[in-house]
Amino acid sequence: MSSPPEQQLATIVVVEDDLLNMKLVTTVLGINGYRYYSAETAEQGIELIREHRPDMVLMDINLPGMDGLTATKNIKADTDICEIPVVILSAMGEDFSDAEEVGAMGLITKPITISSFVEDLAGFLTSSAPPRTRKSA
C-alpha cells in the first residue's frame, strides 16, 4: 500500500455490524485518504448520514434491528438525503436486483480484497452510470 494522500478524497459512512469487517473497511478507507464515519446499526447509520452528508454510504444487509435494504429504501425516500449514493456491502451473494429495487447504486461482495475494493470505491464515487455489481474478491 502507498502512503496516504495529502487530501481527503471523499466522506463515506460505513454501516457494518461485524467488527472485523468494519475494522478492515475503515482501515482501508483511512489509508487511502477517505474520511469515514462508522455505525453498527442502520438507525445509527442514518443519523450519521443526516449529520455528515457523506459522498457515499457502504451498507451491510444483515444488521441488528432494521436491515440494510430497508435502511436503503428509507434513505432513498427521505428528500433530505436521497441523493447520497448507497452501495450494498454484503457476503450473502445475492443478486443485485433486491438492492437495485430499493435504490442502491451497486453491490460490493465480501470478503473484499484491498486493491479491488479501492478500485470499486473510486468507480462508484465517479460514476453516473446505472447501478451495477462489483465483486471485490
Image (cartoon, rainbow, N blue to C red):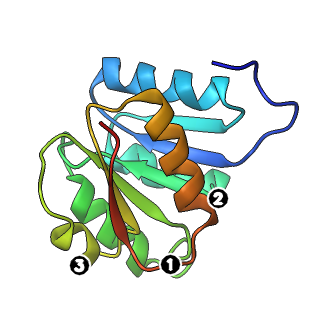
Label 2 sits on a secondary structure element that is loop
Q: Mark 1 points at which residue?
A: 129
Sequence-wise, which precedes: disc 3 or disc 1?
Answer: 3
Q: Mark 3 points at which residue?
A: 101
> Label 3, label 1: how many angstroms apart (C-alpha)?
16 Å
**Residue 21 vertical placement versus 93 (above, below):** above
* Quadrant showing the N terminus: top right
Q: How far apart are marks 2 and 3 (CA)?
A: 23 Å
- Quadrant of residue 102 in the image? bottom left
- Identify the amino acid type marked 3: Glu
Rendered location of residue 42, percent (x, y): 33, 49
For this view, does 4 lie left or right of residue 51? Answer: right
Q: What residue type is labelled 2?
A: Arg
**Upstream in the sequence, badge 2 or badge 3?**
2
Point out the frontmost of discs 1 and 2.
1
x, y percent for residue 119: 53, 45
Q: Which element type, helix, strand or loop, lies under badge 3?
A: helix
Residue at figure coordinates x 66%, y 51% from the top left = 52
- Report the side of 132 relative to 46 (left or right): left
Identify the residue at horizontal 48%, vertical 49% (top origin).
Answer: 120
Q: Mark 2 points at which residue?
A: 53
One can see residue 48 in this view: no
